[in-house]
Image: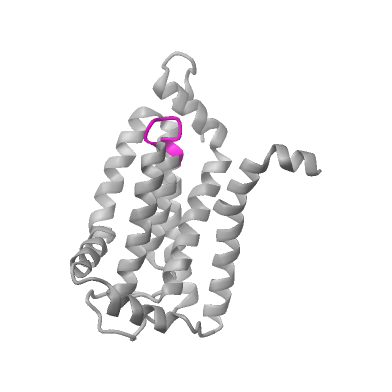
Amino acid sequence: MLLWMRQHWRPLLALALLIVFPLFLLGYLTQDIHEKEVFGFDAPVTLWVRANAPAWFRQVALTFSAFGSATWMTPVSAVLLVVFWRKSAVMGRYFLISLGGVMVLNIILKALVGRVRPQIVEWLWQEGDKSFPSGHATMAAALTVTLVALLWRTGWRWPLIVLGTLYTLLMGTARVYVGVHYPTDVLGGWALGIFWAAGTALVLWKRLRQAQQHATEPGKVVHLGDQSA
């Protein structure tokens, strides 16, 4: 058993970081918030972020809030869906299931948990729906994991990991800074986005790798687009 674990420590670590830990964190936060538990660090972290962020971060936070909204994310996601579907139907289906599925799950969790948005600092951005989990944080994390999975076999892998991680962290910080989310809303959104996108990729990983090979080396894999995902 130990020998097997030593031989497979990389996939086991990826499984723990991308699926097991996010799922555990999401379940823990969802249960406690649904039961009206109070997290002692929510208010202090929010106040610290608002007080200590540099002046220029205000515009950054507003820009990220706008870009992460449905008004912008819907057309951007639609364009990316078309791009990946033209490369491979398998890649397109994964993109659709990953982002479309996580969006539906976010809506369901918001309705089930019913957490009211925080009133810790003055809002710099207006929102009307429930607070947990953060939709902006969910979509940022899911988009990053999805793009990394789709472009894993290309030279974009590491730039996407670095830039996507930075984008996801900034999106979450921005939502706390503008006052419309608790830090635990953001943590829950990150956990949901990572778990769903990574879990979907794991289920479809063999077919995704074949589709990526077909996209980069035409002729080696045939009729992938005709197979169901």
Segment colored magenta: 149-156
- Which residue lies most toward the right here? 1
Residue at 19% over, 72% down: 55
For this rendering, which residue is in front, 81 or 21?
A: 21
The residue lying toward the viewer, choosing from 53 and 43, is 53
Give the vertical position of 80 relative to 186 (above or below). Answer: above
Q: Is residue 40 above or below residue 147?
A: below
Q: Quadrant of the N terminus?
A: top right
Q: Quadrant of residue 123?
A: bottom left
Residue 58 lies left or right of residue 203; in this view the side is: left
Figure quadrant of residue 214: top left
x, y (%) of residue 136?
35, 62
Provide the major secondary structure of the magenta segment: loop
Whether the magenta-drawn stretch holds residue 183 is answered as no
| Colour pattern of the rendering | one colour
Direction top: furthest residue: 219
Q: Position of residue 213 (x, y in %)?
A: 46, 23
